[in-house]
Image: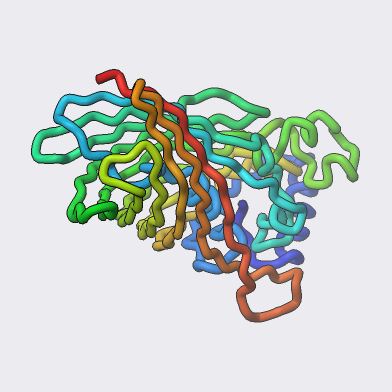
Amino acid sequence: MRSGPTLSASLLLVLLGSAAAAHAQVSLDTREELARARPEAWALRWHAAALAPSSFGPVEPGPARRIELALDLAGLPTLSTEQRTIGFNGTKTEDLNRAPVAARARAVFGLPAGFALDLSWLPPVTVDGARGNLVAVGVARSLLESGTLRLTPRLWFQTGTVEGDFVCPGDAAAAGDDPVANPYGCARPSEDRIDLDQAGLDLALAWSPRPHPQLATWIAISARALDSTFRVDALWSGLEDRSRLDYDGGDWTLGGGLSWRSQKGWISALELRWTPLEVLRPLDGGDQPSDDSLLQVQATVGYRLR
């Protein structure tokens, strides 16, 4: 996810960097606001949607001071080579497939007046050279409970970072002067970082065979605002690259799932989420964005302490 409008521009930078390497190290320190359909922006939006916290349906009615602890798993679909070709406005392939799933710990606390507070944390565990550290907080309360139906809005906010050697992977840097394995002349693994801040409003409608059941199903829609920055920290072809790509915008997600609560306190849920995303890839030869949406599975298992 790097700046540069065309393939010719990226090649020019490589040539300039190679020519300058024998004399002095060149510094590239630019900042760019990304258009919504740019491939780099698509990648930022895709990861923000995939890592957004879920409440797994409407808040469960219950007394204040209740505590639930859970482990959430968010599936991360494998991206194709075409989808990973996002750098230099969709002409350079980046190393984005690092883990099939992201795990976060979550706690839910019952509050007075029927409110519920949820806290979640994706801890900084390194997987294949990538490490996330994301914290989220949400507040929810049922607005409508009518027979077997329950309607719940939820406000939430998430902040944190995702770090890794995305621009110059370790394998490429280790290949040295091999033009095939290291076409951009990476001198070391990059230390790139995504700063991710997003806030959202969820609205979930649940149905169950009877009030306060063990089994329930729901549909939910989530609207969110994203403020994200990709910061490059790479050394390639004599260039010390400190480029910065910014994206601000909004997206929405539609989801649905099934949850089960045992009388002994165990909780589990499975959710399918769909986020519409569009992207304009110059290598496709068109001038209109195409659909490249995210379809994702999330799951949770937890226990109610009291």
In the rendered image, the residue lying farthest to the top is 305
In the rendered image, the residue lying farthest to the front is 210
In the rendered image, the residue lying farthest to the left is 113
Tell me which corner region of the image, top left, top right, bottom left or bottom right, holds residue 3. Answer: bottom right
Judge whether 141 appears above or below 123 on screen: below
Q: Position of residue 96 (x, y in %)?
A: 66, 43
Which one is nearer the viewer's eye here, 158 or 271? 271
Rendered residue at 77%/53% (across/down) = 81
Q: Is residue 219 visible?
A: yes
Tell me which corner region of the image, top left, top right, bottom left or bottom right, holds residue 216. Answer: top left
Q: Is residue 29 visible?
A: no
Which one is nearer the viewer's eye here, 104 or 134? 104
Q: Position of residue 292 (x, y in %)?
A: 62, 64
Rendered residue at 70%/52% (across/down) = 84
Tell me which corner region of the image, top left, top right, bottom left or bottom right, holds residue 111. Answer: top left
Rendered residue at 29%/18% (across/down) = 305
Q: How many marks?
A: 0
In the rendered image, the residue lying farthest to the bottom is 287
Rendered residue at 79%/49% (across/down) = 19
Which one is nearer the viewer's eye here, 168 or 75? 75
Q: Position of residue 234 (x, y in %)?
A: 64, 39
In the image, is 143 to the left or to the right of 237? left
The image's colour scheme reads rainbow
Which one is nearer the viewer's eye here, 14 or 215? 215
Image quarter in which the C terminus is found: top left
In the image, is 220 to the left or to the right of 240? left
Q: Position of residue 273 (x, y in %)?
A: 51, 53
